[in-house]
Amino acid sequence: MATRRPKSEMSPLPEPTPASDQRVDAVIEELRKGAQLAEFLRQQVELIPEHGRRDAALANVSDISTALASSLSVLQSEREQLYSPSSSSSDAGVAAHAAPAFGARNGPVARARRAKHRRGSHGQELPIKEILTETPENDGFHWRKYGEKKILNAAFPRLYYRCGYSDEHKCPAKKYVQQQDNGDPPLFMVTLINDHTCDALFPAEQPPGSSSSSSANSQVLDFTKASISSPTMAAASAAVPRLKKEEDVVAGMSVTTPSYTYDELSSSSLPLMSPMQWEMEMEMKSLFRRQDASSGS
DNA sequence: ACTATTTGACCGTG
DNA sequence: CACGGTCAAATAGT
């Protein structure tokens, strides 16, 4: 329930606020810090073994992230309106997104989000989580991109992913990734729809040979190259190893505990899990081959 | 050769 | 009618 937000949109702000650029910039900076902290908090919360408790905490964190993201978005758009688009971006990769002056036909910021449901003839409420992160791919799941769409008043397109095991395990999990800003550490709004059913299947398939009973919550550790328009992102994902075959992919290992101290958070800009750590996880993963189990429906 | 990604069209919803 | 989400054929990367 917490993941749902009221329909109250942010102020339309058709007129530029008299706030100075520096001020806006400072606020944006603070918001980003807050977003980072929220992200770290989310990662910590994800380690909570108890399902219910973790879920509730995640929902709260999602709310925080969403609020921060909304504020950030508003400020960003405001600043872009103040500035002239002549500055463009540092790289030519994002060139194609020339926002052609917000048309007056419909409110720009108004209909930010809406139909999250589809084909649900029963009006079933889908579990939706929104998080703001700098590493939209490193969530420990295997995602497969199936679409990309330019969103109305957004500077960056939205990328559509679905669980890599959606075919084999009918996993309904999906996620939308949308870049929020052009900062050096670009932020991405990640919308997670539906829970993974694949991760629930894998742990039960562990071969009896492995004495280590890594029960509790286990997640698929996989990495998908998310081709994001941001060159920064591309560089980040370049260090990520590529998958071989889905059948060779292993699952069911618990995620490493990210040890973030608040000191790191406040001093360094990004103590997020480094690609090296993820790579190590990958190697660990390959030690535990997944047994093909088709004892499903 | 195989698989993931890209990209534009199509379709449903508001 | 416009927008957002998904499909699916074509393409690229390994």
Image (cartoon, coloured by chain):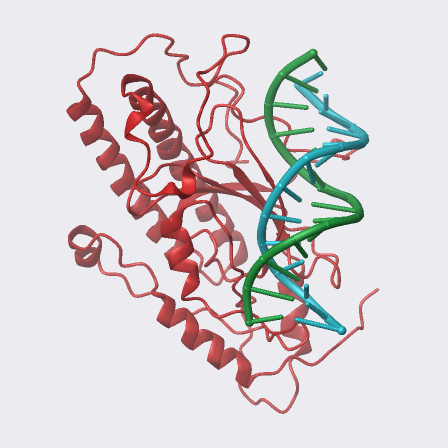
Chain colours: A red, B cyan, C green
Q: Nearer the viewer, residue A275 or A266?
A: A275
Residue that appears at 41% across and 12% down: A12
Tell me residue A261's x, y (percent): 22, 60
The answer to whether residue A170 is above or below residue A289 is above
Q: Is residue A223 left or right of residue A256?
A: right
Is A175 situated left or right of A33 in this image?
Answer: right
Residue A170 quadrant: bottom right
**Residue at the image position 67 percent from the left and 74 percent from the top:** A204
Q: Is residue C1 left or right of residue A73?
A: right
In the picture shown, does residue A266 fall above or below C4?
A: below
Residue A238 appears in the rendering: yes
Q: Is residue B2 above or below residue A126?
A: below
In-image side of A118 versus A253 (left or right): right
Q: Quick one: which residue is furthest to the right in this view?
A: A297
Report the quarter where the N terminus of chain A lies: top right
Quadrant containing the C terminus of chain A is bottom right
